[in-house]
Amino acid sequence: MTVNPPAKQSGLSFTAVDVETANPQRASICAIGLAKVRDGQVVDTWSSLVRPHEEFAEFHSRNIDVHQIRPEDVAEAPAWDTIQQELSAFIQEDVIVAHSNFDRSAIERACTIYDLEPPTNVWHDSEILARNLLTLSSYKLPVVSSFLGLSEFIHHRAMDDAVQCARIVTELANRADVNSLDDLFQWSHHEARKAGSGARPLGDFTGLSTSNPLEGEKVVFTGALQILKRAEAQSLVESLGGKAQASVGKTTTLVVSGDFDPRTLRPGANLTGKLQRAQELVASGQPLEILDEQDFLERIQVAREALEAATREQRVPNASQWLPSYVLDQAKLANTQDLDYNAWLRAGLRHPGGRAKPSDPCIRCGTPIPDGLFWLMLERHTCSDRCASALKRAAKRAWIKEGIHGPDAPTRYGKTFRY
């Protein structure tokens, strides 16, 4: 499904960026794409292949499989020291948006290799935005794009990815009825705090239907669903009177494919094992239906918005590795300020809603926060030393993964400990 372009949004202006790399080293940029947005519309684009620095020039087969760029394609391409000048000329003073922190980290590392100053512009992350405002099975660019009904694009082509990142931001701003990035991200943090109420235990989908629309049905899921993770989808089936099955068999009555396309059932098409088995059973006379995700929601008469809300209410406080998106966003912001280690750590971990009040839910386990806690735990909305430590450990892992490096910790026994 393709949606019409959003209405003109005065003030919503930025530049979206995407890079591809030759190998797992982030400095090995081999392509870059930029999309300039003015008043909510993409008005200009720029892209280029990039010849990676000789120390990072090896192309790994896995990367080639992803973006289809090969060493011979970049043999005559400009190196990063030339590209960086064109990048700066295109972006100028714009706020930069990328889908995940990977692109920012890659650009900063490429600049370091050539002893260049990386862009000092303000950065925003559209993946964080999507996590705050949507409840999906994944927040990768194609999943978010498909959920929002945006036009199709070629994933991992830098130009297309940058344009699609821009479209995601403008569509979310259009839905929120805001006209600036600052307002949009503030609104997204507000929605994320409101959503993480812990109102539902894991797997609880009660209240979505007054009947049992799946009574007697044996349901199998295949492919990537948009809203639900596989375990959540199976719990939903059970709560609506059906039985979830792991594989397609002679008792299966419904197969739900998250990436189902009627064209995939044409003779000679490549099918998943489950879809192929389902098609064989249908041909043998078994009364079995194959649905896509939207048809499934219509069958059970559950609105997408209601399913999103119920999923988010149970997902946030129960995921043991869950980390609030603001922890990444705030650490990035803290990096733009002149802070020592302790102040930087505090700025990254503090809850944006201020200190917790007694009975507020702990962001790690959902337990009501007791009265009389140490101020630091109240500031982080954690109920105990255990949850406060778990939050900090998860944040450190995420910061390292995303390439977010704050000030060095004070020296101890002659060694400097980061974080």
Image (spheres, rainbow, N blue to C red):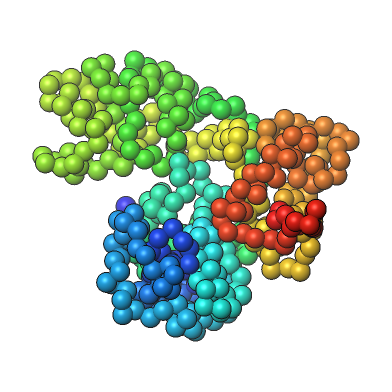
Q: Is residue 246 visible?
A: yes
* 99 vs 31, nearest the viewer: 31
Vertical position of residue 113 compared to residue 141: above or below: below
Q: Residue at x 33, y 26 (%)?
A: 220
Residue at horizontal 59%, vertical 38%? 321
Query: Going by the image, does 377 lie left or right of 316?
Result: right
Q: Locate residue 60: give its quadrant.
A: bottom left
Residue appearing at x 60%, y 34% in the figure:
320
Q: Position of residue 301 (x, y in %)?
A: 40, 31
Q: Residue at x 51, y 81 (%)?
A: 88
Q: Is residue 153 left or right of residue 179?
A: left
Q: Specify whether residue 191 is in view.
A: no
Q: Is residue 353 above or below residue 48?
A: above
- Examine the rendered structure and indicate whether residue 258 appears above or below residue 129: above
Residue found at the far front of this picture: 414
x and y percentages locating residue 246 in the rendered image: 35, 24
